[in-house]
């Protein structure tokens, strides 16, 4: 088996080995893949994190030895900086939020024979707190990122990509598509029982799950629709105040995180206390 890691900021994964082919997902720097096939300058890969398959440009991949592949996957550090330079002796690579720092020692990382210095904020997913507050802080870092089908970075991200990346930085594996993500977790029967970090799934009216978002305090939803935004959520679905209508029909709420003590929703809390709470949680 052949292995590789993404050696550029963002590498598209495509349905076919051609630049004009649809982008199904993206690799961020340091993320690893297994190479399943090749065609000219393209490699058909399986992503280590979620198993999604696609074609990647071979020039954007760094071949890895099996031991290097295992080391990166078993000891991951992830950038929490929105954008930060990864500095080598003669060049730098702009890393985005969610990029992997291979063999990171607190100051430097290494990919193959190339050593880099990184001075941005870093999280070790296995040591991240499994709390709704942490999930929401991560999700808010993506606010106003433009929507991009197949995207997984602050420069373009889709709904399931947002959910996957936020949970990845908490050490939790989720599949790439909302239709697969809905199969994980425990159902929450009523919106009044939801907690921060729960996932709300939406269908197209024919029963097909086609959208997902992260529930925030006050029955708000962080999701990617045009851009990453916060909208009101109730048992009908997502209400967009700009369009003054419901844009997505709620199908089910799932809980991935451990249960937390019950907290009052915005309908039960006083307007003043809710306003203070929102202000306090606006910054990360």
Image: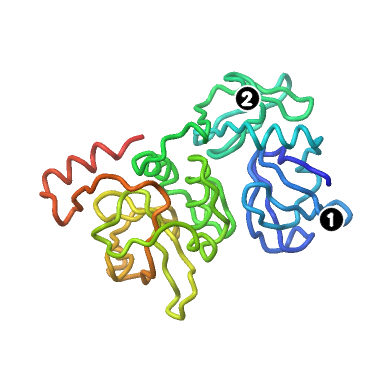
Per the rendering, the mark at residue 3 is: none
With respect to residue 184, does 49 lie above or below? above
Left or right position of 112 against 210: right
Front in this rendered view, residue 98 or 189: 189
With respect to residue 191, does 262 lie above or below? above
In x, y percent, where is residue 27?
65, 47
Q: Can residue 154 be seen in this view?
A: no
With respect to residue 120, does 256 lie above or below? below
In x, y percent, where is residue 265?
20, 53
CA gap, disc 2 and disc 1: 30 Å
Q: How crowded is mark 1: few (under 14 residues within 10 Å), some or many (20 or more)?
A: few
Left or right position of 56 against 241: right
Q: Which residue is drawn at 46% across and 77% down?
A: 207
In x, y percent, where is residue 186?
40, 58
Per the rendering, the mark at residue 37 is: 1
The residue tagged 2 is: 104
Q: Residue at x 26, y 57 (%)?
A: 193
Quadrant location of residue 176?
bottom right
């Amino acid at each position: 088996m052949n292995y590789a890691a993404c050696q550029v900021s963002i590498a598209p994964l495509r349905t076919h080995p051609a630049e004009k082919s649809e982008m199904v997902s993206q690799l961020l720097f340091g993320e690893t893949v297994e190479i399943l096939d090749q065609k000219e300058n393209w490699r058909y890969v399986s992503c280590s994190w979620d198993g999604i398959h696609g074609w990647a440009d071979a020039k954007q991949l760094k071949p890895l030895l099996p031991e290097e592949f295992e080391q990166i996957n078993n000891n991951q550090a992830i950038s929490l900086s929105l954008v930060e330079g990864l500095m080598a002796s003669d060049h730098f690579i702009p890393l985005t939020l969610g990029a992997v720092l291979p063999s990171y020692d607190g100051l430097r990382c290494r990919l193959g024979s190339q050593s880099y210095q990184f001075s941005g904020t870093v999280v070790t997913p296995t040591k991240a707190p499994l709390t709704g507050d942490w999930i929401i802080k991560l999700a808010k870092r993506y606010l106003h990122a433009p929507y991009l089908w197949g995207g997984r970075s602050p420069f373009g991200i889709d709904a399931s990509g947002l959910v996957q990346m936020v949970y990845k930085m908490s050490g939790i594996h989720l599949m790439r598509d909302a239709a697969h993500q809905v199969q994980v977790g425990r159902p929450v029967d009523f919106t009044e029982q939801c907690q921060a970090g729960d996932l709300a799934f939406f269908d197209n009216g024919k029963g097909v799950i086609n959208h997902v978002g992260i529930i925030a305090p006050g029955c708000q939803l962080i999701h990617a629709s045009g851009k990453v935004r916060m909208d009101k959520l109730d048992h009908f679905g997502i209400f967009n105040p700009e369009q003054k209508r419901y844009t997505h029909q709620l199908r089910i709420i799932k809980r991935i995180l451990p249960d937390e003590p019950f907290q009052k929703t915005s309908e039960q809390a006083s307007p003043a206390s809710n306003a203070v709470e929102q202000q306090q949680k606006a910054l990360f």
